[in-house]
Amino acid sequence: MKFSNIFFKKRKKTYLYEVLINLNIKNKKFFKNVLINDIKNLEQAGTNDITFFHSSKYKKSLINTKSKFIITNAQLSYLIPKSKTKLIVENVLLSVAKITDYFYPYSTNDKCENQFINLKKSKKYTNVEFGLNVIIGKNVKIGKNTIIGHNTIIESNVIIGQNCNIGSNVIIKKTIIGNNVIILDGAIIGKKGFGFFPNKNKNIRYPHIGMVIIGNNVEIGCNNTIDRGSLSNTIIGDNCFLDNQIHIAHNVKIGKNSIITGQVGIAGSSTIGNNVMIGGQAGISGHLKIGNNVKIAGGSGVVKSIPDNTKVMGYPAKDIKKFIIENK
Amino acid sequence: MKFSNIFFKKRKKTYLYEVLINLNIKNKKFFKNVLINDIKNLEQAGTNDITFFHSSKYKKSLINTKSKFIITNAQLSYLIPKSKTKLIVENVLLSVAKITDYFYPYSTNDKCENQFINLKKSKKYTNVEFGLNVIIGKNVKIGKNTIIGHNTIIESNVIIGQNCNIGSNVIIKKTIIGNNVIILDGAIIGKKGFGFFPNKNKNIRYPHIGMVIIGNNVEIGCNNTIDRGSLSNTIIGDNCFLDNQIHIAHNVKIGKNSIITGQVGIAGSSTIGNNVMIGGQAGISGHLKIGNNVKIAGGSGVVKSIPDNTKVMGYPAKDIKKFIIENK
Amino acid sequence: MKFSNIFFKKRKKTYLYEVLINLNIKNKKFFKNVLINDIKNLEQAGTNDITFFHSSKYKKSLINTKSKFIITNAQLSYLIPKSKTKLIVENVLLSVAKITDYFYPYSTNDKCENQFINLKKSKKYTNVEFGLNVIIGKNVKIGKNTIIGHNTIIESNVIIGQNCNIGSNVIIKKTIIGNNVIILDGAIIGKKGFGFFPNKNKNIRYPHIGMVIIGNNVEIGCNNTIDRGSLSNTIIGDNCFLDNQIHIAHNVKIGKNSIITGQVGIAGSSTIGNNVMIGGQAGISGHLKIGNNVKIAGGSGVVKSIPDNTKVMGYPAKDIKKFIIENK
């Protein structure tokens, strides 16, 4: 779960008191002189980062974390080592969202950018072919022999490899794309995920500072929507082919050589293995693990993780032989 | 079911003979001097409006209507009070469609508008930020601090509130939008619904003179399609969040604080309550009533109305506990 | 299965040795002086065309083919008449794909075109109304009184009839459209189908040299994706109405007067009859035959062919009465 900040500008080191200003935490004033660099999870946090502990599943990481300041709730607080400072809140993840939003100020909205390259004057893209009305943001890197279709919008800092064929009416942001990739017309890649805390009258969005990473030789179909990750990234592995009207939610990771047919939806944070085949209109719930070489029949609704080398069908999806016998 | 005509220009008062000219009605010539203002349902019709009676369910309204001219069929005609003039046709709703189309001449097609503001010269939108290639029709109202993304098309008379973030490649027509609304890239809002009378060789479209009304703090996902109402309106309540690739058909009404996940479809004229959660790829048939606080599991197919505070799953959707036990 | 080449430029007659250069075939050098015109199936091939035999189902056509050069595999080769030259390969269809790609060099990618008409100077379309930023390729024919919406892209050689209403943000390529057709905003018509040979690290696309043919009085909904055929065509019959977010895969053929509701998906090479009604979100597997006057309930998953005059529901779809009784 390494993440890069090429897409999101982080605030500089800042006083912990400032970081916590919107949270209901006692004795914040003690932190007026403590400098904090970032918010990270237990494993990745350094000595200058704040971190969080929201489930006893992560006890091991808690003991090893380098961070000195740990957001947690009253029930879990007894597990925090005495050498650390505990910051007790009611809702840990909501607090994490607020702090992340503080460090990465533009990560909860997707307001369209207002700075672009003047393609007619730019000498940066001499080996790239552009359609009409293309909009390219600042610092976009595009490999040679790549084609960008009409009306397509590529936002700042996006990286696209060589020999790619990007269609028309495509929108790409917060995304890194390999070589020989085809992205078909109307695909929208890299917008923030559908992640928020439900809240009467005004839901609270949580930050999406992850990105979309697309491997080599990938094909992304027309009108697909592929959302970027929240803290981790959304990943489409090498040589995956996606048909039209597919929705890939935030943090989904798809292995190599997988084939996904039209109108499939994969909910947030699910992992798909290598050489997986998913039939049309199948749906996969969030936070599941689909093994390697799995085949999911069209129309299936997958609500449990699936081991390697399995064929499933149905809603809820089960072993395909069982499904066929039961439905004779 | 109040509806406004800010989007549809109605003909002026016109002779009933003209209104009926395309219908197979006897003795039309008697109506050469009768002036008619509009066509409305039994309850809303005034003394100068024509109305219609197509089902005995509406007997009560029939007795109280102010209208003097009532379209009906031969079977129902005996119920029309003697004080009224009955206009006997074979297919009441088809005739209503033809008359509505007569009064509102552009309500059955969605031909793209050919008149727009010159944004470079206009001084109307000083507090609005526009992307490139934006197309704004006549009399559009946009609140301050709202952003309109690249290539987005907003047709005449649309109203958008303050602090909204409209994405790129968005198309909005016949729609009124509240404050703090986010509409993500590629969404298409306000086109006519999929409503028509099947007819060999040439189906007959019926008019869609309703609109789309979107409340405050709403989020509409990428590539969503939200159709406007036919006679009533399509409504998305305050603080509803819709994920990507959702389809909302004409006349659907969604309450407040509801959350709809990716690729859900809601068929025409269904009503969704407050605080409803709908999982990915679920489908809801037309003309149903989904109560408040209902949870619909992803992939479900809802074919019956659902009472308040219920959790359902399956196709056809049933009580979630029952579904889980049956599918163990 | 007649197909025209108005969209795909075929190579001129060429030496068989050249045609086979990328295939692992013995004694290719013997074919240095043999001229070949095209690759066609057994029935359509002429004496100068190469053909292929990949299944014993086609024995009858094999005996009657005019072609003298037949691609086949080792197992089937004993069936080839002695008067013909057999060309033994490991994978017949993959070899056919490679040869087709050789004859039709641009049929496996959909790179956006870079030549267009200058609409401001052109006098070709005097009776056509164009929105802003429309992009029209070479040799496009558009009938009188047709309207083309904003930002719409119509690629070379497309034919559109009279009185059509093409929406905004629409993309049309390799397509022939009749009269009085409505194509709503965001539809993408005519891109290559999702057809390829799975292959580790780099799938091999097969050519799509078919087109999309749309009849008269058709309506195509918003954000629909309709892929062109591979060797045959994708066909939407007269007076078919398609709702929003529908996906029609390559080679699908739909009869007249059929009605398809939102978010339906039809997989490759299936045939749909006349007067068929398909409810929302239903899915139809590939290579099926759906008869005339069939009704498919919303949400159904159709995995078998359906005879004329049948109503089905469920996943897998079965007789609707049976489904309703079983699910009471």
Image (cartoon, coloured by chain):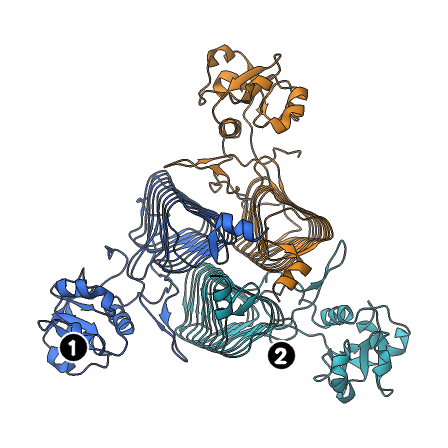
Chain colours: A blue, B cyan, C orange
The 10 Å Cα crowd at callout 1, few under 14, some 14 to 19, many 20 or more, is some
| Residue A275 higher or lower than B276, as above or below | above
Q: CA distance from mark 1 to mark 2?
A: 52 Å
Q: Residue C35 versus residue B19: which sits nearer the camera?
A: C35
Q: Residue C187 versus residue A168: which sits nearer the camera?
A: C187
Does dot 1 land on a helix, a strand or a loop? Answer: helix
Write down the quadrant of residue A39 in the picture. bottom left
**Kind of residue at disc 1:** Tyr
| Residue A261 higher or lower than A207, as above or below | above
Across and down, in percent, residue C174 comes to 58, 41
**Kind of residue at disc 2:** Phe
Q: Give the residue at mark 2.
A: B3
Q: Residue A126 versus residue C247: which sits nearer the camera?
A: C247
Which residue is pictured at 60% across the width and 64% down the height? Answer: C327
| Residue C172 higher or lower than B209, as above or below | above
Write down the quadrant of residue C198 in the picture. top left
The 10 Å Cα crowd at callout 2, few under 14, some 14 to 19, many 20 or more, is few
Q: Residue C301 versus residue B185: which sits nearer the camera?
A: C301
Across and down, in percent, residue B192 comes to 62, 65
Q: Give the residue at mark 1.
A: A17
Numbered circle sitting on residue A107: none
Give me the chain letter of mark 1: A
Can residue A186 be seen here? The reply is no
Q: Are marks 1 and 2 in one subunit?
A: no
